[in-house]
Image: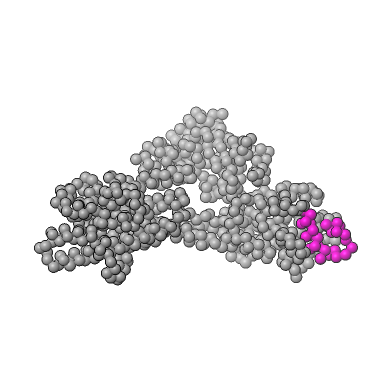
Amino acid sequence: MGNSASSGRGHHEETVDLGYLTPQGIYTGTRDWNQSIVAQLICERKLAPFYRPLEDYDESWDDEQIFAHRREPLDADALQPEGSSSRADSMSVASRSSHHKRGHGTSNSRDLTRHLDIAVYRGAVECPICFLYYPPNINHSRCCDQAICTECFVQIKRAEPDPKHLVSEPASCPYCVQENFGVVYTPPTWRTGLGSEGATPPSWPESPKQSDTSTPMSAMKRPRKSFGADSPEVVTIDQIRPDWEAKLAAVRAAVARRANRRIIMRQVGDRLIPVGISSGRVHALPTEDGQIEGGEGGTERGSRRSRRRQQNQDINQLLGSMGLGGQDLEELMVMEALRLSLIEHEAQQRREREEEERKKAQSAAELDTNTQSQSQNLVSGTSSDSAPSSTSDTASALSTSAPVETSQIVEVTDPADVNTLTPTVAIHPLSSTPPTTESSSPSSDGAHPSVESDGGLSLDSATTSQPDGSSIGLSAVASRPETPVSAVDAPSNYDVLLSSPESAVSHKPLLRSRPPTPLADSGAASAN
Amino acid sequence: MSLPKRIIKETERLVADPAPGISAAPHEDNLRYFDVSIQGPDGSPFANGVFRLELFLPEEYPMSPPKVRFLTKIYHPNIDKLGRICLDILKDKWSPALQIRTVLLSIQALLSSPNPDDPLATDVAKHYKENEKDAQRVSREWTEKYASA
C-alpha cells in the first residue's frame, strides 16, 4: 500500500502524512470507537492522523528543540532498538522515492526525513483539551472552528445510555455546546504515506534550511465557515461509534424486560421473602386486572400495583448493579420454566372455573357442597388433570390470563416451601395448600373476619372460601407491597445518594417542611 | 500512571496566574487532589468569608468533571450540608474544554447568584424563596461564624 509498507520491512507503523492511524497513548481508557472507521477516515484525509504531540512548543525553537519536546513513542515502539531511527528509515524511503533518488547518502537522507518529520510541527497548535501541541493540520470543530486533536476527538461521545435516561443525546461541542459535535479537517497540500499513491507528489523543499521559512504547511488554509452536521466534509462522533443506536436499543430492551420482571415473594409469617424473579419476557396483559380486581376496590389496587411496578424496576436496577443482570440467560431459563408451570396452573384453574360454572348451571342447589369438592379438584388437579387435555385451552390461557400477575401470588404460610426456587413448588397456591385446610372449612369461616385486621394475611381461609385462589393471593400482595419494596429499595436510595449530590437524603434532618421539589419526595419518604 | 500533561499544565497555570479571589494548590502526595479556597464575592452575603473546598481530578479527567466539595459550612441553596454543590457543569453539562480555573470561577459566581429554583439544600432554598432577606442574614451569620479568615 503506502510507501512505508512497501519498503518490505514488515513495519507495523502505517502512517498518513507523517502521522499514525492509531492513538499515541494520551488517553488510557478503552478504545470504544470503531478503529477501522477512524483509520479509514484518516486515510481519506477526513480526519487528522494521530500525530505524536509535542509537550510544549515555541515558534523560536529549532528542530532539535522540537524533537526534544516530542512525546515519547508508545511502548510498542519503544521495544524496537531505536524507535526514532527506524521511523526515519521508513520516511527516508518515502522521500527517496519522490525526490532524492540519487546523489544523497543514507545519512543525508535520514537527516532530511528527520527534518521533514519535525517540519510538520512548525506552527504547531495547542489542542485546548489535552494541552498538547500538534501540527497545524489539526481538526476543527464544525460549528465554531476550534482546534481539537484526533486523540481528543475520539474520546468525545454520547453519554452512555443508562436505565434512568433512556434517551441518548448527541454529544455537543465542547467549546460552543452546539449539538451534534463534528469536526472538519483540511489536509496539508502534500501527501505521504498511505493513500498518497497517485496523488500530488510531496513538494518537499529543496533545501532543509529553506524549509524553516516555507514549511509544507504554509499553504494550508483553515476552514472559516461553519458546517452543518450532515455536510460531507464533517466527521461526527456518531460516525466513529456507529453502534450507539444498537447500544441504546439494548439498554431500552433491558429496561423494558426488567420493568416486566417481578420478584416473586412468598409470605412467611408476617414477612415476604423473595423466592425468585419472574421472566421479564412475559408481557403483562391488562385483561386479568379487571377480571381479578373488578370486584372490590379495583381501581385503588390498580394504582398501587403500578406504583409497585415502578418500585420493582428500581429493585431490578439494583439487582443489575449488583451484577445479577449479567446472569440474564441462566435466570431466564429458570424463570421460563417457572413461567410455564404458572401458565399450566393458570390453564388448570381456568378449566376448573369453567367446570364449576357448568356445575353451577347444572344445579344451583348443590352449590355449597360443590364449592367444597371444587377445592378438592384444584388440589388434586395439578398432578392429574393437567395432562394435555386441549392445547388450544392452554394457548388461550397463555394469551389472556397474564402470567405475570400470577407470579405475584403470595403463598400461604408454609415454611417448608420458602427456600425453594423450583417451578413445581413455586406458585401453586392450591397445590401447596395442605388438604387439611380444605377439610377445615368451617373454621375458615371463622377465620374470615380476621382478613381485615391482618391486612390480607389469612390467605388459607380465603383460598377455601373463594374458588379463585389466585385473585385472593394477588390482592394479598397488593395490600402489602411496602414490606419488600422498602427493604430492597433502601440500598438503592443509598446508591443515589452516593452518586448524585442532588439526593435530599443528606439534609433530611434539616427538612422541616416539604418544599415543592422532586427532592422532597425521597427526603420525606426516608424521613418517615 | 504518570500525570497527564494537561493536569501538570493546568496546575502550573493556576499557580502562575491565579484567578482573583481563588487559590488552588495540589497536595504533595496526590497531584490530583487540590486544596482550594475561594473568597466570598463582594456584595454577596458571603463577602469577607474565605471558603475552603476540596477538588479532585478523577482518572477520566478531563473527559469527566472534577469532583468539588465545600469543606467550610455555608448557608447556600445550592450547597448542601455535606458541601456538595449543585452546578450543572459539574454534572451533565461538563465539557472537556472547561478547566479547574473555569470550574472554580463558576463556583465563585454561584456564591454571588444563588439559584433557589434548582436547590440542593431544600430547606435553605425554601428560606431563600420565602424570605430572601432573612435567609441572607443567616448566610452572613454563617459566613462570619465559619468562614472568617
Q: Position of residue A89 (x, y in %)?
A: 79, 58
- Say which quarter of the image contains residue A6: bottom right
- Say which quarter of the image contains residue A343: bottom left
Q: Position of residue A385 (x, y in %)?
A: 25, 65
In front of the other: A289 or A463: A463
Q: Position of residue B21 (x, y in %)?
A: 60, 36
Q: Position of residue A60 (x, y in %)?
A: 79, 48
- Left or right of A205 in this view: A421: left
Farthest-out residue, left: A365
Tell me: residue B141, above or below residue A239: above
Q: Which residue is drawn at 81% across and 55% down?
A: A115
Is residue B41 in view?
no
- The colour scheme used to paint the residues is one colour
Farthest-out residue, right: A103
Q: Residue at x 85, y 65 (%)?
A: A101
Farthest-out residue, front: A384
In front of the other: A510 or A443: A443
- Left or right of A267 in this view: B52: right
- Left or right of A509 in this view: B79: right
Q: Which residue is drawn at 45% across and 43% down?
A: A497
Magenta-tinted stretch: A84-110
- Say which quarter of the image contains residue A105: bottom right
In front of the other: B108 or B64: B64
